[in-house]
Amino acid sequence: QVQLVESGGGLVQAGGSLRLSCAASGRFNSINSMGWYRQAPGNQRELVAHITSGGIANYADSVKGRFTISRENAKNTVYLQMNSLKLEDTAVYYCKALIREVFGTYQYWGQGTQVTVSS
């Protein structure tokens, strides 16, 4: 059973930084793309950042220049470095991965980690 486990969320003051991690575990052949999404109360889940297996990243306009996505393939882990955090970054952050298994490629989500930015 493939699992994605996130960590690193918490409470931070505006202007501060946090680093989220998401590690994939279980039996699989490889990981294709990985990404971070977020969902604030009353809002739809939205893409924050995405990174391909080759390391090409793209970002939501709202986080460009402040957030950096990276991955460590040897550890099956994706990171999200969040700097200059704003109140509007408050949300539950979810990791998503496209994972290649024996019989196909499947999408998995993590359980979510809360990020709260205070004034």
Image: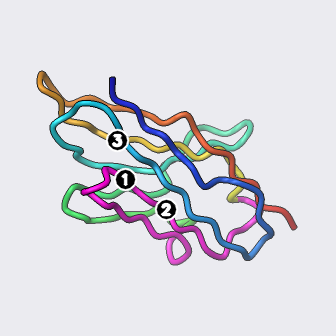
In the picture, the disc for residue 77 is 1
Secondary element at image label 2: strand
* Horizontal and vertical percent position of residue 40: 69, 44
Position above or below: 90 against 13: above
Give the left or right position of residue 58, taking residue 86 as reference: left
Q: Element type at marker 3?
A: strand
Mark nearest the camera among 1 and 3 is 1
Q: Given the image, on which type of amino acid does mark 3 rest?
A: Ala
- Whole-percent x and y of residue 87? 77, 62
The residue located at (78%, 71%) in the rendering is 14
Q: Amino acid at mark 2?
A: Leu
Asked whether, in this view, residue 36 is left or right of residue 44, the answer is: left
Q: Is residue 66 magenta?
A: yes
Residue 25 picture quarter: top left
> Residue 28: x, y in percent?
21, 33
Left or right: where 43 falls relative to 3: right
Q: Residues within 10 Å of mark 1 (few under 14, many from 20)?
A: some
Please state the extent of the stretch shown in magenta in the rendering: 64-88
Tell me which amino acid carries mark 1: Thr
Q: Which residue is mark 2?
A: 80
Q: CA distance from mark 2 to mark 1?
A: 10 Å
The residue beneath circle 3 is 97
In the picture shown, does residue 17 fall above or below 59? below
Q: Residue at x 34, y 61 (%)?
A: 71
- Which quadrant does the N terminus fall into? top left
Q: CA distance from mark 1 to mark 3?
A: 10 Å
Mark sitting earlier along the chain (1/3): 1
